[in-house]
Image: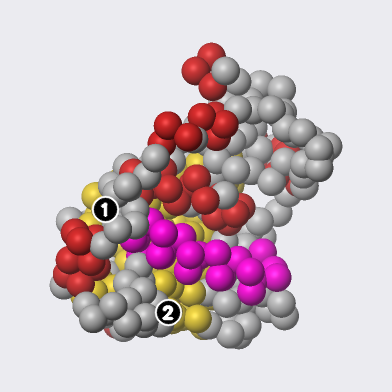
Amino acid sequence: MIFRIAVLQKRSEPWNIARNLWSLECEMEEAARMGADLLLIPECYMTGYELPAKNEDVLPSSGEWLDVVCAMAKRNRIGVVVTALTRGSESPRNSAILISKQGKILMQYDKVHTCDFADEFCLESGEEFRVADFHGIKIGIMICYDREYPESARILMMKGAELILVPNDCESMQPRVAALSTRAYENMVGVAMANPPGENAGCSCAYSPICWDKEGKCVDNTLLLAGEEEGLFLAEFDMDAIRDYREHEMMGNTFRKVGAYHMLFSETIEPPFLREGQNKKGSKYEKDWLH
């Protein structure tokens, strides 16, 4: 089974929801013509990645705008990961919503690793990494800064993800693209990332977890690596080959020695990693089980 993801490298118009809905429908129509099963778009596409923002000014996580997107998906028979700043309990969240080909909402993921060193300090962090079944394929989502931490992809893999999708909006992509290739390799999952175009930006990409063939020879796992220009690109994942690879190779969750991992649960931060804005008050991670 070949699973096709259309990866959009395009910048939206901040807070122009009507314009961005029209743009999204055009891209969904084109992705469907390309034979894609799902459209992946950059981070906060519906609202623009414009911060700081107030809770009352961002989109609700349900309602008319999302109903329109669901109708688009159903009409075009294509799934989509739609992204926006959405209302949280007290502050906005950076969200990605997975919608099926039938226009059904499968899950909402809220960015866990908010950039508290920058304007995302005004956001609420999500509380968990999530995986959903998309027409028989287990899909996990992480957003931009989440991918800087290997634990994000690791947890998604442990929750059953076969593919990890990454809405993104940042620059200086070379090391970040390399890290995504590594996330695919070490977790035996497919990875696809959508980033806006521009100088020192772009580089939307997709990687297979298959890094050597059945004879043990290394193979290039790059399925897609765009330049800096705007565009809609297609990445094809051979799910039969990926599933066969996951059945017998020795990465992912095979021989990990988790007894040595206890420090991963520590919230203690020591030099040289002390930064202003760490450990926000009211963080959802101030839970007894982490201490």
Q: CA distance from mark 2 to mark 1?
A: 21 Å
**Location of residue 159 (image quadrant):** top left
The C terminus: image quadrant? top right
Q: Position of residue 88 (x, y in %)?
A: 56, 32
Q: Is residue 106 above or below residue 182?
A: above
Three-letter amino acid code of the residue under disc 2: Thr
Q: Position of residue 137 (x, y in %)?
A: 23, 57
In this rendered view, identify the residue nearer to me: 36 or 55: 36
Horizontal arrangement in the rendering, residue 13 relative to residue 18 (left or right):
right
Residue marked by disc 1: 138
Which stretch is magenta?
170-191
Q: Does the segment drawn in magenta span residue 180? A: yes
In this rendered view, identify the residue nearer to me: 25 or 153: 153
Answer few, some or many: residues within 10 Å of disc 2's Cα (few below 14, many 20 plus, some between 14 and 19).
some
- Which residue is drawn at the image coordinates 55% and 55% (left, top)? 147
Q: Main secondary structure of the magenta part?
A: helix
**Location of residue 52 (image quadrant):** top right
- Which residue is drawn at the image coordinates 70% and 70% (left, top)? 172
Q: Is residue 33 above or below residue 252?
A: below
Quick one: label 2 or label 1, which is nearer the N terminus?
1
In this rendered view, identify the residue nearer to me: 239 or 291: 291
The N terminus: image quadrant? bottom left
Three-letter amino acid code of the residue under disc 1: Lys
Of labels 2 and 1, the one closer to you? 2
Q: How is the image coloured?
A: secondary structure
- Which residue is drawn at the image coordinates 59% and 36% (left, top)? 125
Q: Position of residue 209 (x, y in %)?
A: 35, 68
| Residue 222: assigned label | 2
